[in-house]
Amino acid sequence: MPEDPESSFGIYVHWPFCQALCPYCDFNKYLHQNIDHAMWCESYLTALQTYSKNTSLTRCQSVYFGGGTPSLMNPSTCGRILALIDQLWGFNSNPEFTLEANPTSVEANKLAQFKDNGINRISLGIQSLKNTDLQRLGRRHSVAEAIKAYQIARNLFSNVSLDLIFGRQNQTLLAWQRELQEALNLMPEHLSIYQLTIESGTVFGKLKALNKLTGLPCEETLATMYELTMATCQNAGYNHYEVSNFAYPGYEGRHNLMYWQSKPFLGIGPGAHGRIKIDQHYYRTETILAPEAWLTGVKTNGTGESFRHRLEAWEQAEEYLMMGLRLNDGISLARFNTLAPHHLNKSILEMYVGERLLSIDEQRLKATQKGRLVLNRIIADLLP
């Protein structure tokens, strides 16, 4: 995966509405009701037009519709957004247009319409292949619906990704091994596999604080589950290109790679984050969280932004390290040193290389498979 921070940019479009609020999710989301789809579409278009006038961005290589549940959007909204992006910036050859979708029957039946409006990659939030766990996770679909939705997506798209969560309540290592194999038997081009993380502020977070979230696997079991996941996916022919992501060669998620390689991207919609370029400087942006307030913000300032911070070189270096070490390819030490020479803690670096948690190969710093188990600690220690 060649790394060129100046080559292109991506656009993230956040649709904040869901049919139900899952108890583990801490994303910016709201219940889906009384949506003025025409108004939302026009607001997205206005934000894009504003950014086209005041940023220094080249051609677009990917657009990612996330949420929330963007498969609840009108498919024509995707089509209009993609058409305007093409008009304003143009696309690189073979661009990636991803839509997140839940595998309920209603949303699955809309997938053909999304394809007709330009979507060429689907990310299905299956999360589990066990009905009791789907109920615990607050999901509105069954295993049978998930398989049916996958088959519909499989017939329409040549690039399908599945989301799965491990480390769930009362989940054993053997049960996860069987479930993971069931998912691999479907042969999706891409898999995003996450450990269940209990975030404060969520329903699960509140239950855990009250000692009412029982049956969570211990740290040792979670580590073994992750090691099993890495080995099983790699044996099935998947490239473990990022800590939580696996793909058949050539199907790595190009949009998310831009995050991990610290490339520029626009964040459109309530609560979206961005990393934009103006002249020769990079800025971190955030938008207003509440949907109605974001709509008002777009009318006021054209983007709905609530925060913009110019990134100093050392901040870019830290961001590059934190995101890039998640990748199998790691980071370029030459690029890091250009941004912040002598910024790494050399003694800590040498210690972790000696412990085989990190490796240096042809001037690229990488986390080993063993190092990925403690990556957060490594990154915190490397930065002075």
Image (tube, grey):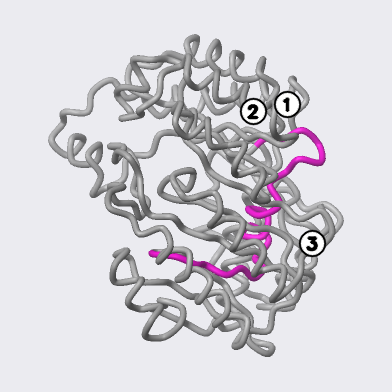
Gap in angstroms between the C-alphas marked 3 and 1: 23 Å
The disc placed on residue 3 is 3
For the point 56% across and 61% down, the residue is 12
Name the front one of labels 3 and 2. 3
The amino acid sitting under disc 2 is Met
Q: Quadrant of residue 287?
A: bottom left
Q: Position of residue 220 (x, y in %)?
A: 44, 25
Magenta region includes residue 250: yes
Q: Position of residue 329 (x, y in %)?
A: 75, 50
Gap in angstroms between the C-alphas marked 3 and 2: 24 Å
What segment carries the magenta color? 246-270
For the point 29% across and 24% down, the residue is 136
The foreground one among 23 and 108 is 108
8 shown above or below 52: above
**Judging from the image, what secondary structure is the residue with disc 1 in?**
helix
The foreground one among 242 and 266 is 266
What residue does disc 2 label? 230
Q: Quadrant of residue 191?
A: top right
Please tell me which of labels 3 and 2 falls first in the chain: 3
For the point 62% across and 36% down, the residue is 112
